[in-house]
């Protein structure tokens, strides 16, 4: 033999550092998914606005509101508490109001969604 083994089992890396890094990455991935509420991962009904009309997204998570709108819809957010906060993680927000109203023709119109964090009440701040 020339020092090479034909045994394919040696292609598995058994280095303790690699094993630790892999286990850590898997643990972090699991923790990240466990922090996401199930309602964010569940389907929200239709994937796109039907027939070019504005769907009713009030009361939904921001993620499900995205799913209900056509992919090329321009969306503007307004902080429902008036604090001018930016939406950085859509999974942490819910929709309190919308413009245009449900059922209105879209016709390339821009959509404005009034949003608050999940633990806040619409229109009153925290909840």
Image (cartoon, helix red, strand yellow):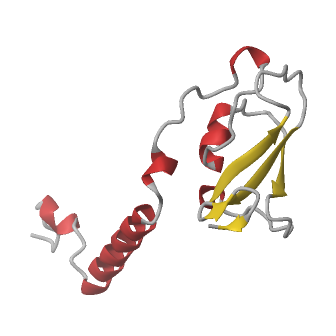
Determine the image quadrant of residue 102: top right
The residue lying furthest to the top in this view is: 51
**Residue 120, how many percent across, how many down?**
65, 64
Residue 112 vertical placement versus 6 (above, below): above
Residue 5 vertical placement versus 99 (above, below): below
Observer-nearest residue: 23 or 50? 50
**Residue 49, how many percent across, how many down?**
70, 24
The residue lying furthest to the bottom in this view is: 17
Residue 10 vertical placement versus 14 (above, below): above
Is 97 on the left-hand or right-hand side of 43? Answer: right
x 90%, y 30%: residue: 109
x 79%, y 33%: residue: 72
Observer-nearest residue: 4 or 43? 43
Is 10 on the left-hand or right-hand side of 114? Answer: left
Quarter of the C terminus within the rendering: bottom right
Determine the image quadrant of residue 53: top right
Is 110 on the left-hand or right-hand side of 117? Answer: right
Residue 116 vertical placement versus 113 (above, below): below
x 84%, y 55%: residue: 78
Determine the image quadrant of residue 89: bottom right
Observer-nearest residue: 4 or 19? 19
**Residue 27, how many percent across, how many down?**
34, 73
Quarter of the N terminus within the rendering: bottom left
**Residue 61, how many percent across, how many down?**
61, 48
x 48%, y 48%: residue: 39
Is 79 on the left-hand or right-hand side of 68? Answer: right
Number of numbered discs visible in the structure rendering: 0
């Amino acid at each position: 033999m020339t020092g090479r083994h034909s045994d394919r089992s040696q292609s598995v890396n058994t280095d303790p550092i690699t094993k630790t890094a892999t286990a850590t990455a898997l643990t972090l991935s699991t923790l990240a998914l466990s922090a996401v509420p199930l309602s964010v991962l569940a389907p929200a009904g239709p994937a796109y606005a039907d027939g070019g009309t504005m769907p009713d997204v009030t009361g939904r998570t921001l993620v499900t509101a995205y799913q209900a709108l056509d992919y090329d819809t321009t969306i503007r957010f307004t902080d429902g508490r008036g604090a001018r906060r930016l939406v950085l993680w859509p999974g942490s927000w819910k929709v309190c109001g919308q413009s245009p109203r449900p059922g209105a023709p879209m016709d390339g119109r821009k959509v404005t969604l009034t949003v608050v964090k999940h633990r806040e009440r619409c229109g009153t701040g925290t909840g």
